[in-house]
């Protein structure tokens, strides 16, 4: 019997209609739908996004990916998740793993797919691309993310503020993902460089609870949720 | 009478099913669909992508965006396109402008929307995000574009090769769009840095004519089409 395929389906950033037609077809024909389990008793984000699209006869499995840094803890979680998924795949059943944003862009799916292929090199994996958060945030802001010859830098998190300084010297557009924990320090750098009016934050892009800060001038401190993205348009773009 | 809305609809990189559900709904209910005209008598790319989704009673308008560098020529084309679109908008008719890739990411739509809003500040514009080429290429390669704390740099074109050298010193992942014209020089830099095995090219991602080069070791020269993207995974990622 042929084995099943693990599909990594990008479901976009929050609005359920941002899933692609291709992703939706695969999602709705899948017998088994997997997703990262929510934390603190809440539904997972990808699970919430696809809720309007799935039906009761589809089997749902919540996979546990702990929010920790310890490599060993993570690896054992990935191995457990891969084993759960493999149970279905080896019986010839496809599994649709849904991921918020795009499945190739800082996604949990990458770890699941890698671990599965290490343990079972014969396994079949396919990714369906989707809407990533910088694109969703730019559309929400009604501004281009990039135009013309602009160079774009995306920083997933900031561990060293000097790095941000170097990037602001060089790039035309800088995107900071997960900016919440370092926001006050980042604000000071943007203030010193007179970039606050060209810096914008989108919290929870395209979700119902989306919040937009279109200008950071009067906002030296903000309580930001985990899914907050900061877009700095470093160079002037009065007319592009 | 209220004016119509100009929708910028991202239609993805080639596979018609990569349009989002939201984009498809707007596309199929639009009375007027606009797109960049093709060149040399061919259909435009976005027009080809949406062909399976539109019906004969929908009015189609091809807008002319010349492939030139001269600012004055471009501006007069944008103004003409904005005037064509405004004819419908001012009569209360929505216009769905379709764009390959994502509408906020190096897109013709940005110029059309800006010009329209300069001439008619009262105009209404809305963008629907979509699948951009780096995400589509990564899925086609079956590799993550980025994982963990990797820093991503996207260069839309390369005007100075020193810039590429500096980026390769610093970023974990570098994406070069429109690499065709500078490919031989880029290849030499990648060779000197021993990065050829970690460099990949996707031509026309997700289109029927897609070609993948999974390793550039033996390819010092390649005839690449305009829509070719090079992804360099600068730092080793044997286990991520």
Image (cartoon, coloured by chain):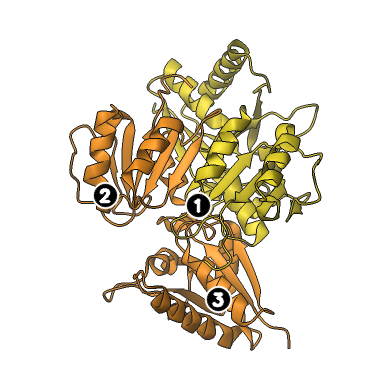
Chain colours: A yellow, B orange
Name the foreground residue: A111 vs A56: A111
Image-quadrant location for residue B221: top left
Subunit that carries the residue with mark 1? B
Mark 3, Cα crowd under 10 Å, few <14 / some 14-19 / many 20+, is many
- Cα separation between marks 2 and 1: 26 Å
Residue wearing tag 1: B131
Q: Secondary structure at mark 2?
A: helix
Residue wearing tag 3: B115
Both marks 2 and 3 on one chain? yes
Query: Is residue B91 visible in the rendered structure shown here?
Result: yes
Image quadrant holding the N terminus of chain B, namely bottom right
Name the foreground residue: B187 vs B212: B187
Q: Position of residue A40 (x, y in %)?
A: 80, 26
Name the foreground residue: A44 vs A3: A44
Query: Is residue A31 visible in the rendered structure shown here?
Result: no
Mark 2, Cα crowd under 10 Å, few <14 / some 14-19 / many 20+, is some
Residue wearing tag 2: B182
- Cα separation between marks 3 and 1: 25 Å
Q: Is residue A71 above or below residue A2?
A: above
């Amino acid at each position: 019997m042929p084995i099943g395929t693990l599909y990594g389906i990008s479901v976009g950033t929050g609005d359920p209609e941002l899933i692609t037609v291709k992703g939706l077809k695969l999602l709705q024909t899948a017998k088994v739908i997997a997703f990262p389990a929510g934390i603190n008793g809440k539904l997972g984000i990808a699970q919430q996004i696809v809720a309007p699209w799935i039906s009761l006869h589809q089997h749902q499995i919540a996979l546990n990916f702990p929010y920790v840094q310890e490599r060993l803890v993570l690896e054992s979680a990935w191995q457990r998740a891969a084993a759960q998924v493999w149970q279905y795949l080896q019986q010839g059943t496809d599994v649709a793993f849904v991921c918020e944003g795009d499945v190739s862009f800082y996604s949990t799916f990458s770890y699941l797919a890698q671990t599965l292929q290490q343990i079972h090199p014969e396994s079949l994996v396919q990714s369906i691309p989707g809407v990533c958060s910088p694109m969703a945030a730019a559309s929400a802001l009604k501004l281009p993310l990039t135009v013309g010859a602009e160079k774009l830098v995306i920083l997933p998190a900031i561990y060293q503020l000097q790095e941000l300084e170097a990037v602001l010297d060089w790039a035309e557009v800088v995107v900071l993902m997960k900016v919440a924990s370092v926001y006050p320090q980042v604000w000071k750098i943007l203030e010193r460089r007179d970039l606050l009016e060209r810096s914008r934050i989108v919290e929870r892009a395209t979700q119902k609870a989306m919040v937009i800060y279109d200008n950071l001038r009067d906002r030296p401190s903000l309580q930001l949720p985990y899914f907050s993205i900061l877009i700095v348009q470093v160079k002037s773009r009065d007319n592009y």
